Amino acid sequence: MRKVSALIALAVIVCGTGFAWVNENPSMPDEPKSIKAVMKEAMKNGLAKKVAEGKASDEEKMKVLNLLIDLVENEAPKGDATEWKMMAGTAMMNAAKVVVGREGAGEAFGKSIDCKACHDKFK
Ligand code: HEC
C-alpha cells in the first residue's frame, strides 16, 4: 500500500509540475523558494523535527508543509530527477498527513526527512 500511495503522489506531482518543465518561462510568477531556503527555514532550525515529534503548533505544521511543497517544486543539484520528486514528494505527502491529523503520521514524516539519506543522493 505504501508503494502504491507513493506512486499516486508521484503521479500527481509529475502532472502538477510537468507544465513548468516543458515551459521554461523565466518570469513564472510562482517561483518556489530555493532548496537552501527550505533547508534553512524547515530543516536546519529543527522545525521539521519538531513536527515529526508531534510538538509543533498547527501553524508550524502548515509552515513545514508549505516549505516542502517548494522543495518538491525545485530540481535537486545532483542525482536522478524522478527519484528526487519521489523522495521530496514522500516527505511532502507525510507532512500533509500530519496536517490533516492522520494517525502515525508524525513518525512516518520523521522517517521521510532523513537528512543524510537525502544529502548523499541529491546534495
Ligand atoms: C528530501 C531531501 C532532503 C532532506 C530530507 C534534507 N535535505 Fe538538506 N539539502 C538537500 C539538498 C538537495 C541540498 C543542497 C541544496 C543546494 O546545494 O542547492 C541540501 C542542503 C542542506 C544544507 C545546506 C544549505 C546551504 O545553504 O548550503 C543544510 C544546512 C541542510 N541541507 C540541512 C538539512 C537537515 C538538518 C536535514 C534533516 C533534518 C535535511 N537537510 C534534510 C536535500 C534534503
Image (cartoon, rainbow, N blue to C red):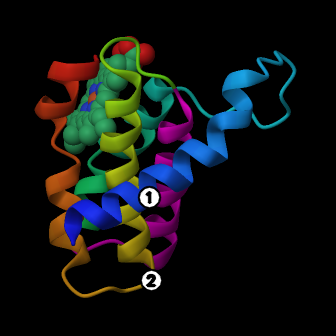
Q: Residue at x 23, y 60 (%)?
A: 3
**Quarter of image, res 94:** bottom left
Image-based side of 117 in relation to 72, left or right: left
Name which of mark 1 and mark 2 comes first in the sequence.
1
Query: In x, y percent, where is residue 107?
Result: 15, 69
Image-based side of 81 in relation to 121, left or right: right
Q: Residue at x 15, y 43 (%)?
A: 114
Q: Which of 89 and 36 is in front in this view?
A: 89
Compared to residue 17, the image places residue 105 above or below, namely: below
Q: Nearer the viewer, residue 40 or 99?
A: 99
Compared to residue 93, the image places residue 75 above or below, namely: above
Is any atom of residue 41 visible in this view? Answer: yes
Image-based side of 66 in relation to 103, left or right: right
Image depth: mark 1 or mark 2 in front: 1
Residue 1 is marked as none
Which region shows up in magenta?
Answer: 54-74
Which quadrant would the C terminus be assigned to in this image?
A: top left
Query: In x, y percent, where is residue 8?
Result: 43, 61
Query: In x, y percent, where is residue 83?
Result: 31, 32
Q: What residue type is labelled 2?
A: Val
**Quarter of image, res 28:** top right
Residue 100 is marked as 2
Residue labelled with disc 1? 9
Residue 67 among those drawn in magenta? yes
* Main secondary-structure element of the magenta-colored stretch: helix
Q: What element carries label 2?
A: loop
Q: Which amino acid does label 1 sit on?
A: Ala
In the image, farthest residue toward the top = 78
